[in-house]
């Protein structure tokens, strides 16, 4: 793919001006346009958001949830807290064109169903307001709000959602906004989760939350059902007057491509994502024992400090740039090459003085990014309890099974469901399941220990109902 800086000097003001005008015509908020312009300037200046090993040191020790005192101020803070779920993603990686949170995950319930039930249960148990607020996209809003009509009791003193911003995809050759008449919607992209802060401000949601007396927010992805508001974390967060807190987990083999926390040479905590790693440091980046603590994308925000910081910076936090190179139509490798300018919301850890990280159990981090993850969550390795919490079964001893399904046959949800027509196999006592080839599973299949299935025949392999697999 060509270097997006080629030809940028001549087109500098032209390309940015065209992008800004396109955003204004689409009704994008000025604060979002200013953030985009700041990132565009970084790109033209040769910034790629790279964080080489030579500038970083692993973070050696962090506070741990298991060592926190009792709830502290949580009883008081609970009624001043909002739950924010990032809900802008479509299930495109699984072949869907609707909100990913509407996928069925457990006992006939979707991600969104379970999130709603968790919120209502916490409200009832603690007799607090606890609004659920979704950051939707233009693509997910209608389906999401429609699905939540079955929970009228979710209504609160603030709106149920606010919209994330959007920005134009840029042609890789000259950094002008791309045009794609075949599907104009593909000319736009989300600015990454780092858009959370400007979207909160531009939508008026931040002001509305503070006007209603909310002081804290717990933020997480809608596809991570382990991320439930925890009273001990909230109490500690409030007691210590922490402006920004990130939950992290200790790395495992499964986290080798995840974003990890490090200490910059200037003393700041930083989040380093895959796209920010120079080629020569890629092997080091995958060393999860060295880069020990990994971002869960679950954050705690002090809303007054956030508002103050945004005001000081004219709404632009200046998060590190992430440049993603793709095709304008992701399904067509022959379509024009484009760049997307993004930022990670966890990168704000480097903005707030006094920001901290907290190590949490793996049970609080169960994101579903692939159908392999979905199979684990749907299986008996996880259980849905009376409080609508999805947790690993006690027999798992806090560790989820590792599953790797052949992407050729299982990547798309329709293909995945077709190969488990009677539901998932039992993974209660499974350590690892690897499937290579086209394999169909009958009902009641049990997997124990480490199992690898390899099939290269032209016709699918069918594992009969009730079979026990081991070794």
Image (tube, rainbow, N blue to C red):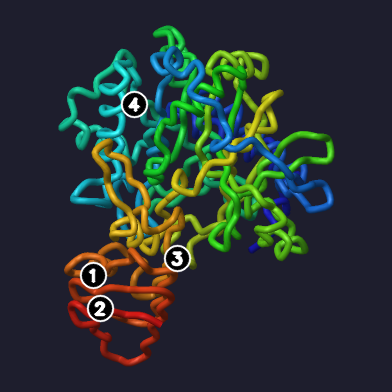
> Which of the labelled discs sits on residue 420, or is there none?
1
Relative horizontal placement of residue 119, taking residue 219 as reference (left or right): left
Relative horizontal placement of residue 346, taking residue 157 as reference (left or right): right
Query: Residue 112 versus residue 38: which sits nearer the camera?
Result: 112
The residue shown at (24%, 32%) is 145
Residue, disc 2: 440
Q: Mark 2 and mark 1 in contact? Answer it, CB < 8 Å.
A: yes
Residue, disc 3: 402
Q: Where, by quadrant of the figure, is residue 434 drawn? A: bottom left
Q: Nearer the viewer, mark 3 or mark 2?
A: 3
Q: Picture coordinates of residue 74 (x, y %)?
A: 46, 19
Mark found first going from the N terminus, 1 or 4: 4
Relative horizontal placement of residue 457, taking residue 237 as reference (left or right): left
Q: Where, by quadrant of the figure, is residue 155 drawn? A: top left
- Label 2 and label 4: CA atoms lie apart by 39 Å
Q: Nearer the viewer, mark 4 or mark 3?
A: 3
Mark 3 lies on a secondary structure that is strand
Mark found first going from the N terminus, 4 or 3: 4
Mark found first going from the N terminus, 2 or 4: 4
Mark 4 lies on a secondary structure that is strand
Looking at the rendered image, the quarter that the N terminus falls into is bottom right
């Amino acid at each position: 793919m060509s270097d997006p800086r080629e030809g940028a000097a001549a087109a500098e003001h032209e390309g940015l001006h065209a992008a800004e005008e396109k955003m204004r015509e689409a009704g994008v908020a000025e604060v979002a346009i200013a953030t985009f312009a700041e990132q565009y300037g970084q790109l033209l200046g040769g910034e790629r958001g790279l964080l080489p090993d030579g500038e970083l040191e692993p973070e050696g020790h962090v506070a741990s949830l298991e060592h926190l005192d009792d709830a502290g101020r949580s009883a008081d803070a609970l009624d001043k807290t909002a739950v924010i779920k990032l809900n802008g993603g479509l299930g495109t990686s699984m072949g869907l064109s609707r909100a990913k949170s509407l996928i069925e995950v457990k006992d006939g319930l979707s991600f969104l169903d379970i999130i709603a039930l968790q919120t209502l249960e916490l409200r009832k148990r603690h007799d607090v307001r606890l609004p659920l607020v979704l950051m939707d996209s233009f693509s997910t809003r209608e389906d999401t709000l429609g699905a939540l009509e079955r929970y009228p009791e979710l209504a609160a003193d603030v709106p149920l959602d606010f919209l994330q911003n959007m920005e134009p995809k840029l042609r890789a050759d000259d950094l002008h906004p791309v045009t794609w008449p075949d599907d104009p919607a593909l000319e736009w992209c989300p600015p990454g989760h780092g858009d959370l802060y400007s979207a909160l401000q531009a939508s008026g949601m931040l002001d509305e939350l503070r006007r209603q007396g909310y002081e804290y927010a717990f933020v997480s992805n809608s596809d991570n059902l382990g991320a439930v508001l925890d009273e001990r974390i909230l109490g500690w967060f409030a007691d210590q007057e922490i402006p920004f807190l990130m939950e992290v987990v200790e790395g495992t083999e499964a986290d080798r491509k995840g974003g990890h926390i490090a200490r910059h040479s200037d003393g700041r905590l930083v989040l380093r994502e895959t796209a920010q790693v120079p080629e020569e440091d890629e092997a080091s980046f995958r060393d999860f024992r060295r880069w020990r603590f990994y971002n869960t994308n679950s954050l705690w925000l002090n809303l007054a400090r956030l508002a103050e910081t945004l005001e000081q910076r004219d709404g632009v936090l200046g998060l590190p740039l992430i440049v993603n190179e793709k095709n304008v139509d992701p399904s067509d490798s022959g379509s024009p090459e484009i760049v997307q300018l993004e930022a990670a919301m966890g990168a704000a850890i480097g903005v707030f003085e006094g920001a901290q990280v907290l190590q949490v159990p793996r049970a609080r981090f169960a994101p579903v990014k692939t159908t392999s993850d979905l199979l684990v969550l749907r299986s008996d390795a996880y259980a849905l309890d009376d409080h609508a919490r999805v947790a690993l079964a006690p027999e798992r001893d806090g560790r989820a099974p590792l599953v790797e399904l052949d992407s050729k046959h299982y990547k798309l949800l329709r293909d995945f469901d077709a190969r488990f027509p009677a539901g998932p196999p039992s993974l209660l006592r499974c350590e690892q399941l690897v499937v290579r080839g086209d394999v169909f599973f009958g009902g009641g299949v049990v997997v124990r220990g480490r199992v690898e299935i390899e099939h290269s025949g032209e016709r699918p392999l069918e594992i009969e109902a009730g079979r026990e697999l081991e070794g």
